[in-house]
Amino acid sequence: MAAHQKALTRPVAALAALLAVLAAAPHRQTAPAAARGVARIISLVPAVTEMIYEIGAGPRVVAVSSYDTYPPEVKRLPNVGALLDPNVERILSLKPDLVVVYGSQTDLKQQLARAGIGVFDYRHAGLGGVTATVRALGARTGDAARAEDLAARIDRGIEAIRRKVHDRPKPRTLLVFGRERMALRGIYASGGTGFMDDMLTAAGGANVFAEVKMEAVQASTEQILAKRPDVIVETRAANSAFAVGERDAELNVWKVLGAIPAVRSNRVYFLFDDRIVIPGPRVVEGTEALARTLHPDVFK
Amino acid sequence: MNTDPGAPVTLAWRFARTVLGFGALAVAAVLLAPLVGATAIDFRRAFDFSIPFADNVDAQIFFVARLPRTLAGACVGGLFAASGVVFQGLLRNPLATPFTLGVSTGAALGAVLAITFNWSLGFIGISAVPVAAFVGSLVAVAIVYALAQARHRGLSTTVLLLAGVTMNAFFSAMILFVQYFASFADTYRTLRWLMGDLDVSSYEPLLAALPTATVAFVVFAWLARPLNLLSLGPDSAESRGLDVARAQRAAFLSASLATGAAVSIGGPIGFVGIIIPHLVRLMVGPDHRLVLPAATLFGAAFLVGCDLIARTILAPVELPVGIITALLGGPFFLWLLIRKP
């Protein structure tokens, strides 16, 4: 039995060694290119994909995740899975020299490291994290100057919106990013940390769940009633927009909580806008969309 | 009905005492729970009907947020506990729960489909999730029933159990398959649904489940004596004049419907259907004529209490009620497993 096993392990080990050599070989060839910048990029993070295109490294992207839809060019690229189901085989076969991964994809990172492929480790953070990611990305892809421009442009854009609304009264806002259809159940709202909360604050709103230091809060009807928001903004990805005929019905759902100022003054809004839900380079436009909703008079 | 002339009187008295005792507990829970919450409300204002309801935040917190939620807890707790009793009696297995035979996983698959693919019944103005959950439970019941019926005269509890466990595994796999297509936010909401949520925010889900629940409880009332006979074994029960196949069929269908209705209101809240029946048996003995009403009432009080903890302990954030029942139920379940009979 033991001898049989041994006989089996030897060819397996040899095969593994051969694979390791094969996987490492193309990397050694492209090593000089890596010094100038990376030539073949795969991004598994939609927000970072947008940044890559924005800093001019788009033509070097060879594959994206299954969640990527923007910019439109990415729809033509091969898709290599996403956060939970990255297709390692496909990633390796495309011979990338840089793969953008989520910080939590530890297995994938190890596999890429073994294959000698560079990894850009993305971690979700607030608005500050967006510009920090842009700068780090630029340094990594060899587009530092354009990345610096973009980061500065984002900072300036957010600052401009902040200044525009800073002397306005801040409406107490409930920012909902998910709930059951046709019911006030399973309501998820932005808590007091994360990029959505930062965008809401920059747009001149006061998050009703500011004191809850979590990105997502499950909001009970009692809490929503007790917080008395002046404005309710429901935001989702563009592709999950309600059908035209159902929009009014979905608005009516809130009528049950008629004592809330937002409901009484008809200030419940739906913003199906990827620029708000993806912490990429379009956050400025997303923040402006929020600011227009909260302060329509300022943006006349 | 009984040869001992004293027994019916004793039973009637014990029944009255059980119902009154556990009933008082349930009523106290339902009356007190809405008075407590994460936010302080002014009860004089809440019950001041001269203020228009639309302007009265205190009244809305009481009547829209807390009261339906408490009633949902009572309904779901009572349904789970009673169907737990019936499943344990039917399968003659103390570890059976309302979720053993695949009903709740079928319901979960329905709900997960509705959440992931954003189904909407907006044209008739209701939420698709509870409807999909209930339909899912019916599908599961139909499959398991057909399997258990297929090669036997009557219902084979062994096949029932095996079919149920298999369907559980199959539906769980299907849920994972559907999850594959879900966005992050939907995955999160699905997971949260699976942990149970009683914040119904209206009375409609309760009214919708009422007909099913009523039918189930009427059958449960009839089932008390058949379940007592079944506990002696199907052969003894048959020899004492019980139509075993009919009783088993009634037990399976009614308890499954009750479970489906409960899951459609509050999601698959675990452990209520096992802790409560056993606690109640420790208190009133094994007679189903006492265990069924006692478990129903105690289950109602228990879940209302658990939900009260869930919505206040970490306020303004809330814990899923399924976590509270699991924290209490898990250790109890283990104790039950190692306890000497």
Image (tube, coloured by chain):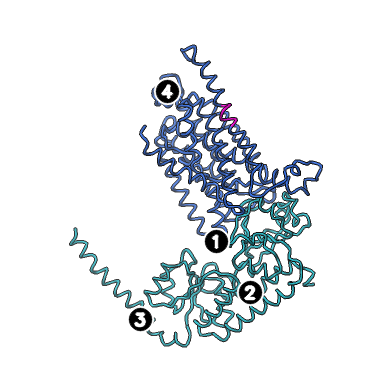
**Do marks 3 and 4 share a subunit?**
no
Question: Nearer the viewer's eye, disc 4 or disc 2?
Answer: 2
Q: How many marks?
A: 4
Farthest residue toward the left? Answer: A3
Spatial separation of the CA atoms under disc 1 and disc 4: 53 Å
Q: Which residues are magenta?
A: B19-24
Residue type, numbered disc 4: Ala
Disc 2: which residue = A282
Relative placement, left or right, of B216 versus A94 is right
Mark 4 Cα shell of 10 Å, populated few (<14), some (14-19), many (≥20): some
Residue in front for this viewpoint, B153 or A62: A62
Mark nearer the N terminus (1 vs 4)? 1
Image quadrant in which you'd find residue A133: bottom right
Disc 1: which residue = B184
Mark nearer the N terminus (3 vs 2)? 3
Residue in front for this viewpoint, B289 or B176: B289
Residue type, numbered disc 3: Ala
**Do marks 1 and 3 share a subunit?**
no
Q: Are marks 3 and 2 in contact (CB under 8 Å)?
A: no
Q: Position of residue B86 (x, y in %)?
A: 49, 32
Spatial separation of the CA atoms under disc 1 and disc 3: 36 Å
Q: Is residue B18 above or below residue A245?
A: above
* Residue B330 visible in the displayed image: yes
Q: Are marks 1 and 4 in contact (CB under 8 Å)?
A: no
Spatial separation of the CA atoms under disc 4 and disc 2: 72 Å
* Residue positioned 51% across, 78% down in the render: A61
The color chain B is rendered in: blue
Q: Main secondary structure of the magenta part?
A: helix
